[in-house]
Amino acid sequence: MVFVKEENEEKRVRSEPEPWKIKHEEPEPCRIKIEESETWRIKHEEQGGELKMKAERQDLNEVDEKHQDQKDHDVSGEKSASCSNQKTEVKKSFSCYQCGKSFRDQSGLKRHTLIHTGEKPFICSQCGKMFTDKSNLGTHMLIHTGIKPFSCSQCEKSFTQKVQLKIHLRTHTSEKPFSCSQCGKSFVHKGNLKTHMMIHAGIKPFTCSQCGKTFTDNSNLRTHMLIHTGKRSFSCSQCGKLFAQKATLNRHMFIHTGQKPFSCSHCGKAFTQKGNCKAHLLTHI
């Protein structure tokens, strides 16, 4: 009986779970939690990676947009510069084949060519004087109306245009701001310098239709034409002598007034005409 009891106790002991084994198996829920935590960490990292990738992709997109904006700006800047260059290039693209003067548009060149052809389509209704440009006719009409709103403060001489007064004032100041780069000769008006430069260039675009003589300036041609027509409109009030030009009459008047404005730089001798003074200077050479 004793033997049977011990055997039963042995069986009972064997069937009971071992305490250390149970304790060892207890952390199973903890292992599950760790696995869940690891899964969450991986998932979080994946989500974080996706967010990071999205942020990086957004940064790249912003960089691309900025680069494209800069590229567009550069292209538009190049186009603008190109357009500006084109405008600069075509600023005066219409040139006169006779004297080389350039103009911004064809209409300006067309008006200019009338000077060379001698055509004067604009006629004064008061005196019949003809002009190549309509604006010149408008200025001329002020002569008939007697309107001269611009007066000189030095001599009270009046002018129909402000630019005429400005040029006139230089006669009082002896200012000659336009100088020739070839010979150093100075002029009161820029137009006179341009005409003078044609002498050095040998350009004489104005030709007399009667004898073929050429001139650098249209005014010289007009004066020359009076030789062929024999017209002398300017009369001396002292002796009645006739002259083709008003300037010639003015020089003639020095004889009557005794004025001798041209002096020799070597001996001080004075002359009524500049040409006579120049001829005298040759005697000192």
Image (cartoon, helix red, strand yellow):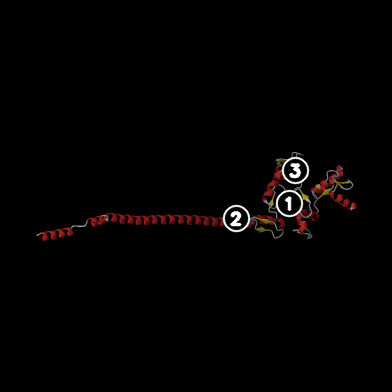
Q: Which residue in the structure is indicated by mark 3?
A: 169
Give the left or right position of residue 59, taking residue 9 as reference: right
Label 1 packing within 10 angstroms: few (<14), some (14-19), many (20+): few
Sequence-earlier tag: 3 or 1: 3
Q: Quadrant of the N terminus?
A: bottom left
In the displayed image of the protein, which residue is found farthest to the left? 1
Within 10 Å of disc 3 (Cα), the crowding (few <14, some 14-19, many 20+) is: some
Q: What numbered label is drawn on residue 191? A: 1
Query: Which is more toward the observer, 116 or 20?
Result: 20
Q: How much space separates mark 3 and mark 2, taking CA atoms?
A: 39 Å
Image coordinates for residue 203, horizontal then vertical, percent: 75, 59
Write the residue at 82% across / 46% down: 250
Dot placed on the residue nearer the N-terminal end, 3 or 2 = 2
| Residue that carries the numbered disc 2 in the rendered image | 84
Task: Give the amino acid at mark 1.
Answer: Gly
Q: N-terminal of the two: label 2 or label 1?
A: 2
Secondary element under disc 2, as helix, strand or loop, is helix
Q: Nearer the viewer, mark 3 or mark 2?
A: 2
Q: Amino acid at mark 2?
A: Ser
Furthest residue to the front?
2
